[in-house]
Image (spheres, rainbow, N blue to C red):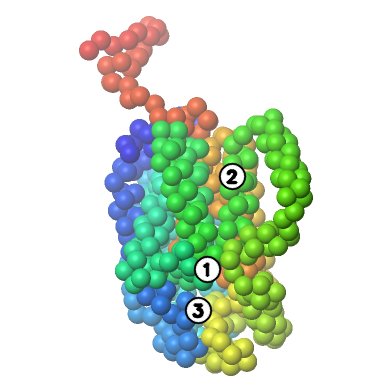
Amino acid sequence: MNRTAWETRHPTTPAEAAFVPPANYWVWIAASIVAFAFFVSEHDVNVSLYEAFTETAEEMAESASGGNAYRRLAFLMLGGMGAAMTIASRRQPWRLNKPMAVAFLLLFGWALLSFLWSVDRAMCARRLIVLVCWTTAAFGLARFFTLRQLCWMTMVVCASLATVGVLSELRLGTFRPWTPEHRFSGSLHPNSQGMLLGTLCLSSLALAFDLPAYRKRCLFVFALGFGLLLLTRSRTATGALLIASTVVASLQVSWRLKSGIAFAGLWTVAGAALLVMVVGVDLSDELQRAVMLGRQQDDADSLSGRFLIWPEVLYYISKRPIVGYGYDSFWTADHIDAISSRLQWGLREAHCAYLETILGLGVVGLGLAMLAVLCGLGTAIAEYSRSRNPLYAYIVGVIVFGLIDSLLESGMSATSLVPFLGACALLRMALASDGATSSARLPQPAVPRWAEPIQHSTGGWKWQTP
């Protein structure tokens, strides 16, 4: 994977012409640091042995009250890396996207201000230190690397952690996909693992379109990631990925091809339905089992308990709807104990990123977060329309995936790996330009110095000779 294949493109502005991409070995170094930091802070190789893949209410309350020293050290390391990369890239050109930059600054500033009204200032201070390190690391990576390199880093980090998860289950003897009750968790809860695998699939799919020389290998990674995603039985992540990957793929093809695929798909569905009716199979039961991914019907009726969780969360939201309880400060030991005792199981998240954001930052915070995300979505669509660069389609896919997954999961509102990788791409788009025409995406042969044209003093051109 040399620099020619990764980074050759034609600059579209003088500022882009001055940009010099870093050597690719820095991508592997940064990927190693990011993977290690997030593995230490949020992964557990024994999680597949836990009941319901989670801690008990008592362990959750103890963790909330004392914090996690390893997590803080990991994020301090991340923050240091981000600061170093920001300094190293100080001479790189800027191309600020003002709407995106202002939206991000407003959201970040509101999170910092929430310390003033937090219900637990010690807890809020710890969370804000983590947020500052998280943001510094994302900012540094966005300034230091190109969008293509960030996409490669995303694929490498997610693939590495997924591999660790498979090896963990093989070591413990819990990797049994042939049994109906198995859910692949690896070193995370299956729903969190689904988010990671969805991001792996999106990044590998985008790189398959971006670099034809690596297309087969990237599609192979996509297939492996999607297979593991199905084994997690995470319906939210699977549905979000299907929609997001369809959006990414549809942006790469012409309207004529889209129409042809849609027409062929309709005929295929109609033919399959006719065949099913002739054979006499109960299609409704088969579709229900497919959508459930092998999960129990009781889980679908209550959305795995979310219809019980959300009324409890909304009760607390009604007490402080405007400003919330302080950034990531709602789930104190008292709140965990109170809600867990009423639900009769351990709980420390709202299972909805939108509700989670309102708990921490109120309706104002949710509005600012949506403003930042929608500015990013609009910018990515506009940049893709201008440059036809599939990496901007990747950003569109990541945003669509996150918006859908946030309906039923809280992970996108946390300072975890998947939002971090998305933030790196969004900040890159807000701080610099990676625009390129479709022809510039292809690897270009290196031109020897003696083969470059030089200009005569008379104004004509000639070719150098070796």
The answer to whether residue 93 is left or right of residue 247 is: left
Near mark 1 (Cα within 10 A), the count class, few <14, some 14-19 or many ≥20, is few
Local secondary structure at mark 2:
helix
Q: In which quarter of the image is the C terminus?
A: top left
In the picture of the structure, the residue carrying the numbered disc 2 is: 248
Which residue corresponds to the image point at 54% horizontal and 46% vertical from the top-left?
Answer: 394
Q: Earlier in the sequence, mark 1 or mark 3?
A: 3
In the picture of the structure, the residue carrying the numbered disc 3 is: 52
Mark 1 → mark 3, Cα distance in angstroms: 15 Å
Question: 312 and 26: which one is in front?
Answer: 312
Mark 3 → mark 2, Cα distance in angstroms: 34 Å
- Spot the residue most to the front: 279
Q: Which of marks 1 and 2 is nearer the N terminus?
A: 1
In the picture of the structure, the residue carrying the numbered disc 1 is: 180
Q: Which of marks 3 and 2 is nearer the N terminus?
A: 3
The answer to whether residue 169 is left or right of residue 114 is: left
- Res 295 → quadrant: bottom right
Which residue corresponds to the image point at 41% horizontal and 83% vertical from the top-left?
Answer: 67
